[in-house]
Amino acid sequence: MSELQINTTQNVNIMFTAASVGERILAYATDFLIKIAYVSTIAYFIFHLSGLWKTMQTMDDWSQMAIILLFLLPVVFYTLLFESLLEGQTIGKRALKIKVVKIDGYQASFPDYVVRWFFRIIDINMMSGIIGLISIIVSDKSQRLGDITAGTSVITLKNKVTINHTILENLSEDYKPTYPMVIKLSDNDARIIKETYEVARKASDHQTMLKLKSKIEEVTGIQSVHNNTHAFVKTVLKDYNYFTQHM
């Protein structure tokens, strides 16, 4: 599985793990079985038990085709419907804990799902899915053609989560906050700050750290009492945790 770096609109780099080919195939297989179960149920209960099939025998070919297509609409639009309702997941994707995301940091929108759904004709339905498979393998972001066109990718949600992956900070019982104005931040702000801080710290990226410090001061109105940028950011995160836990 490859690492997928998503650059948000705030110029924050967030690392995700792209879903493997195996996970995507298993999710597809799960959804396919659900579709088969639906068709089998409809065929048995609607056409067989209700006697609708006998009634259809008296209709012309076009009328028969129209009725069949009507019942098959949920199968045709299955992926589009569920990805729209479940924010990038079908039942199969949810079972495999994978999800469609935008590679620019936005939540994928309905038009994005429409593009992905339309390109299934090429990626999956043509040549038994070989085109989509090759595209995923050779793409550096594990994208099939539909993903490339829509600007999306599929990531795994199975990453092991520790305190370092959340906005939580370890605080001592006698911790004294320094910057009360951190309450102007939201949980999403704190998450972005922590993710940016961790990436910059690991890369020894002093410029990004300075920009982060400047942005925090601009948004909150805080006047830093720390000469050390690392210490300032860590204090902001700890203060945010302190005040949100005691409010």
Image (cartoon, helix red, strand yellow):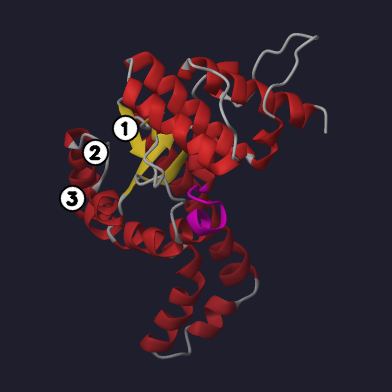
Q: Tell me if 64 is positioned left or right of 148 in this view.
A: right
Query: Please, which residue is most extreme toward the right here?
Result: 247
Give the spatial CA distance, label 1 vs label 2.
7 Å
Residue 192 locus on image (x, y percent): 50, 34
What SS does tag 2 mark?
helix
Viewer-closest of 67 and 244: 244
Q: Residues within 10 Å of mark 2 (few under 14, many from 20)?
A: many
* Inter-mark Cα distance, 3 to 1: 17 Å
Name the spot of residue 140 as percent of width and height, x first. Answer: 21, 34
Q: Find out whether the residues at labels 1 and 2 contact each other: C-beta distance under 8 Å.
A: yes
Between 113 and 15, the one nearer to me in the picture? 15
Q: Pinpoint residue 217: horizontal percent, then vertical percent.
A: 53, 36
Please give the range of residues in magenta.
82-90
Q: Nearer the viewer, residue 113 or 245?
A: 245
Residue at point 39%, 43% (across, down): 8
Task: Provide the residue designation for mark 2.
Answer: 136
Residue at numbered disc 3: 127
User: Going from the N terminus, do you reach mark 1 or mark 2 first?
Assistant: 1
Amino acid identity at mark 2: Ile
Residue for point 48% across, 49% down: 88
Q: Is residue 89 magenta?
A: yes
Dot 3 amino acid type: Met
**Could you say which quadrant of the image residue 38 lies in?**
bottom right
Note whether 71 is above or below 85 in the view shown: below
Label 3 or label 1, whichever comes before in sequence order: 1
Report if residue 159 lies within the magenta region. Answer: no
Residue with the mark numbered 1: 21
